[in-house]
Amino acid sequence: MKLTEIKNFLDEKVEKYNRLSFIETDPVQVPKQFLEKENIEIAAFFSATLSWGNRPAIIKNATILMEMMDNRPYEFILLASDTEFLRLKKFVHRTFNGSDCIYFVRSLRNIYENHGGLQQVFEAGFQADNTVKSALEYFHSVFFENEGERTRKHVANVDRGASAKRLNMFLRWMVRSDKAGVDFGLWQSIPASALMLPLDLHTGNVARKLGILKRKQNDWKAVEEVTDMLRKFDPEDPVKYDYALFGLGIFEKF
């Protein structure tokens, strides 16, 4: 297929999958339950963090975690006592356990109390050189200001070549805004044009079959390669094609 044919094909699939009905089977439905900005951010961050494996299990466990925080995650993170933190000890999603969860909550408390919140941290990192890569690097350094060696495996480090699928998905939720209303578009200082594809097994395999990704590993270089191609299709909103690539892979077995 020529590039114009690939673009037209993917544009059709964006229309098919970038719609509110998509939310019914996607982890984004968890933060959609909230109205306050900080609650949305925190629910989205945890839901993205847990987004590997079976999607019904992801949604179920992210919902359970919000319930463990009394469905007020922002208030819980800022005000919960050490005793209240201990209720999170029981949480588990695959290899993400209660100790990881407590570290996340403590780190988020530090971010909201001392760094202005998640938005301010990502935007400060982005402003270093106007790339999502610099935003992810800065976020990683702030998130692990306190020692948490075991928990590091649950937060992608792009300095080590990670694709950062879950963090890129979180950023897509926070930054993108369109008439479909799937993403939140809460953060205005990072442009949608700078977003990077949340590359996973499905999007990677479909991109390779279409010929817009040559690299075999799903790493940061692959993210850069495929996102550069998607910018040729839509320079202002390349990551809208995440819906098309993911939908082709998960629903159509392309």
Image (cartoon, helix red, strand yellow):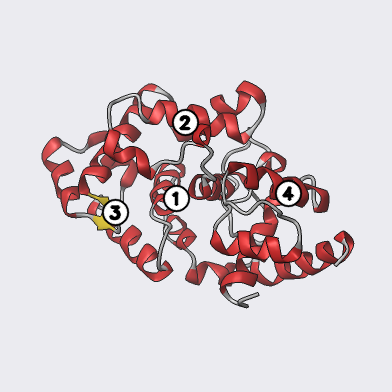
Ranked by sequence position, the earlier of labels 4 and 2 is: 2
Residue 161 placement (x, y as % from top left)? 54, 38
Query: Vertical placement of 20 versus 77: above or below?
Result: below
Q: Are marks 2 and 1 in contact (CB under 8 Å)?
A: no
Pointer 3 local density, CA inside 10 Å: few below 14, some 14–19, many at least 20: few
Q: Which mark's residue is nearer the viewer, 3 or 2? A: 3
Amino acid beneath label 2? Phe
Q: Earlier in the sequence, mark 3 or mark 1?
A: 1
Report how far apart the C-alphas of labels 3 and 2 lie in the structure. Answer: 22 Å
- In the image, 19 versus 139, the foreground residue is 139
Residue pictured at 34% horizontal, 58% vertical: 62
- Judged by depth in the image, the label closer to the viewer, 3 or 1, is 3
- Circle nearer the N terminus (3, 4): 3
Residue 72 percent coordinates (x, y): 31, 48
Please identify the quarter of the rendering in which residue 253 is found.
Answer: bottom right
Q: What distance separates the C-alpha of mark 3 from that of mark 1?
A: 19 Å
User: Between residues 213 and 100, which one lies in front from this camera angle?
Assistant: 213
Image point (15%, 49%), residue name: 87
- Residue 237's tag is 4
Front label number (2 vs 1): 2
Residue occupied by mark 3: 95
Residues under labels 4 and 2: Cα distance? 23 Å
Name the residue at the left extreme.
83
Q: Which mark is residue 44?
A: 1
Q: Which residue is mark 2?
A: 139
* Figure check: 60 above or below 98: below
Q: Name the amino acid type tagged 3.
A: Thr
Mark 1, secondary structure of its residue:
helix
Instruction: Tell whether label 4 touches label 1 (CB within 8 Å).
Output: no
